[in-house]
Every structure is written in C-alpha cells, then in structure tokens.
Amino acid sequence: MIKIAPSILSADFTNLEKEILNIQKAGADILHLDIMDGHFVPNLTFGLPLIKQIKQLCKIPVDVHLMVKNPELYLTELGKWKIEYVSIHQETVIHLHRQISILKSLGIKAGIALNPATPVETVFSIIQEIDYVLLMSVNPGFGGQKFLPLVYNKIKKLRAYSNEFNPNLKIEVDGGINNLNVRKLIELGADIIVAGSYIFEDKDYKKQIDNLRLE
C-alpha cells in the first residue's frame, strides 16, 4: 500500500507542534523532514536540535532527507534518536558505501536521494545495500516547485532493476506531487509519496492525503 509522507517544509512553523499533531490525525504514514544547509542547496531550514524535538512529538516514523554537504556529521545523532529513515544525496558523498554502512549499523533504513539530473543507473551498484531510493521530481531547495515528468522514466527503470536485484527496495518520490500526477507515479512503482504544498495548502489535511491515496 502506498505511504504518504507530508513534508513539514510547507507547514506553519509558528504552530509546528499543532501542525505535526494534525497531520498525524489526518492519516499521514511518515513525516518527512527536509534538512538543508545552505551549501548543497540554496536554502537553509533547520538542524539537529529541532529534529530531536520533532521526533519526540511524532507517533509515526520520521524520514530525514539530508540535503547537506557533510551528511556524516548528522548520522550518529539521528541514530541515537531512533530516526527511522535517512536519505543521503549521492551527489554529496565520495565514500557512499561507508555512509550507508553507518546508517545500517544504527538501525536506520538507509536511502539514497537523487537530483532530477542524476541518472538512476548510478545507484545500481549499491542497490542491494540500501532500503530505498528517493527520486527528486524537482530540483531540491525550495517547496512549491513544478513537477518534472522526467522522473516517470527513472521510476520505471529503477523498479525494473530492483525487482531483479532487490525486490524489497522502496521508491520514494518528492517534488510537485498532487492528485493529478500521483496516479502515474503509483502505477509505475512508487511506494512513498512526499508532498508538502499540496497537503498544507488546504485546511483539510485528511482530504488531501486521501486524494493522494486515490481514495
């Protein structure tokens, strides 16, 4: 069954605790956190102290997307707080196997995130070591961007390859997703849908989440 992971980048940060509680009540499966350092992407969000507080509030799994130049600086702390999912951008890491091994040793589901222009074939050599791939369908850094259809073919290729070499691999897609394009994503093999603007732009979070589930 498809999992919906609201991105709190689009939430009201002046009422963050209320937003987290409401999004859980609305039926979210996972809470998605976009961590930006102002270097890997041209934006800055929040760091470790806020991640820890958010995790303490959450009754659902937390998914940390590290859009940072030095992801290794975060991993030990995220393990201590029992963060469930962490994805590292392949474009930032030289010794990717090492970082994935650290995540696995900490009991974290290890993911690789890919920018839109990064070929999906670049994860094939490590696909048996990871739990999921996060495919960006916008260029990371800001919410509210337009969906890039090129991700459709990337999902198709990744699902075909993973079916042979890692059938348990999950495919997560993030960026510009709404009720109009989500059906094709699911049909092609996406397992986790990240949505920010689409969910938080409407006061009825449950309705928006149900729309993404095609219910």
Image (tube, grey):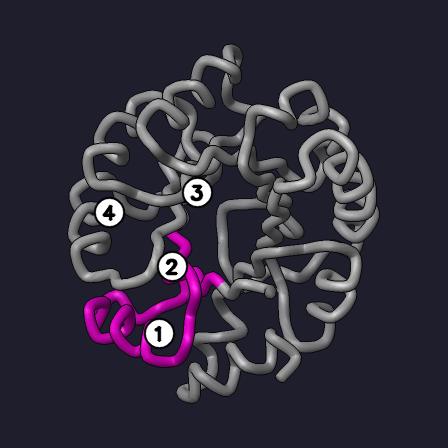
Q: What residue span does the magenta drawing correspond to?
A: 5-33
As measured in the structure, the alpha-carbon distance from the residue carrying label 2 to the one carrying label 4 is 11 Å
As measured in the structure, the alpha-carbon distance from the residue carrying label 1 to the one carrying label 3 is 18 Å
Q: Quadrant of the C terminus?
A: bottom right
Residue 138 placement, left or right of 105: right
Q: Is residue 23 magenta?
A: yes
Type of amino acid at the residue the image marks with label 4: Ile
Type of amino acid at the residue the image marks with label 2: Leu
Q: Secondary structure at mark 1?
A: helix
Q: Position of residue 48 (x, y in %)?
A: 22, 39
Label located before the other in sequence (3 or 2): 2
Question: Could you tell me if the residues under marks 1 and 2 are in contact, i.e. CB atoms within 8 Å?
Answer: yes
Mark 3 is surrounded, within 10 Å at the Cα level, by few (under 14), some (14 to 19) or many (20 or more) other residues, namely many
User: Which residue is label 1 attached to?
Assistant: 23
User: Which residue is label 4 attached to?
Assistant: 51
Residue 9 visible in image: no
Which dot, 2 or 4, sits closer to the camera? 2
